[in-house]
Image (cartoon, helix red, strand yellow):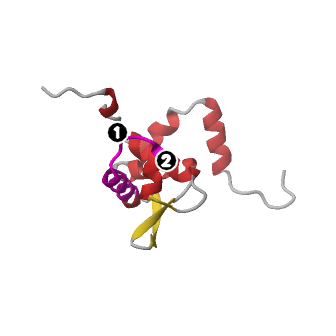
């Protein structure tokens, strides 16, 4: 039987992706995988960081540009934009979009419902109250 030390505990799904994205957001600009690895300060292999960044690229959560023989990575959007992207991916994966949206909306609290109504309201023309 293999025992896992606390240092090698199994992480929750998406936890490493969140850590990598947080590190990228702290960068002053595009960051290399090596920089992200150092920033996380964990015992993560460089190849693990590259794998996570590559998965995030496939999900549209990061972009990359050539930096010598490597790549420099940048978050594609802020927290809200990434959350919205995940919500759209879930919605796109369902066959009955209307049922999913209806279930989502009926589960909203009064404040969120009011906010959603405001966001869906057509923009006002100048002079309207």
| Residue at numbered disc 2 | 39
Identify the element where label 1 is drawn. Answer: loop
User: Would you say the magenta stretch is mainly helix, strand or loop?
Assistant: helix
* Spot occupied by residue 39 in the image (x, y as percentages of width and height): 49, 47
Is residue 51 rendered magenta in the image?
yes
Q: Quadrant of residue 28?
A: bottom right
Q: Quadrant for residue 41, please give it.
A: top left
Q: Quadrant of the N terminus?
A: top left
Q: Secondary structure at mark 2?
A: helix
Q: Which residue is mark 1?
A: 13
From which residue to which does the magenta span run?
Answer: 40-56
Is 74 included in the stretch rendered in magenta?
no
Residue at the location (67% across, 51% down)? 121
In front of the other: 96 or 31: 31
How busy is the neighbourhood of tag 2: few (under 14 within 10 Å), some, or many (20 plus)? Answer: some
Decide which of 105, 14 is in the foreground and name it.
Answer: 14
Badge 1 density bin: few <14, some 14–19, many ≥20, Cα 10 Å: few
Locate residue 87 relative to residue 13 in the image: left or right: right
Relative to 7, residue 77 above or below: below
Residue positioned 79% across, 61% down in the render: 125
**Foreground: disc 2 or disc 1:** 2
Q: Vertical placement of 21 versus 57: above or below?
A: above
Reading the chain from its start, which is encountered first: label 2 or label 1?
1
Task: Locate residue 34, reporting x and y percent.
Answer: 43, 56
**Residue nearer the viewer, 61 or 3:** 3
Residue closer to the observer: 50 or 105: 50
Q: Residue at (44%, 72%) from the top-left corner?
A: 66
Q: Which mark is residue 59?
A: none
Q: Is residue 16 above or below residue 36?
A: above
Give how far across and how far down residue 58 sits, in percent.
Answer: 36, 60
Above or below, 46 against 70 in this view is above
């Amino acid at each position: 039987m293999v025992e896992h030390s606390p240092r090698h505990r199994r992480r929750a799904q998406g936890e490493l992706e969140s850590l990598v994205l947080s590190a990228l957001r702290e960068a002053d600009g595009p960051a290399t995988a090596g920089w992200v690895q150092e920033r996380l300060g964990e015992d993560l292999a460089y190849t693990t960081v590259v794998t996570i960044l590559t998965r995030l690229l496939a999900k549209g959560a990061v972009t990359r540009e050539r930096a010598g023989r490597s790549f420099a990575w940048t978050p594609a959007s802020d927290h809200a934009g990434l959350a919205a992207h995940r919500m759209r991916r879930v919605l796109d994966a369902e066959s009955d979009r209307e049922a999913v949206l209806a279930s989502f909306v009926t589960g909203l609290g009064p404040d969120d419902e009011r906010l959603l109504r405001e966001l869906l309201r057509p923009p006002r023309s100048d002079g309207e109250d």
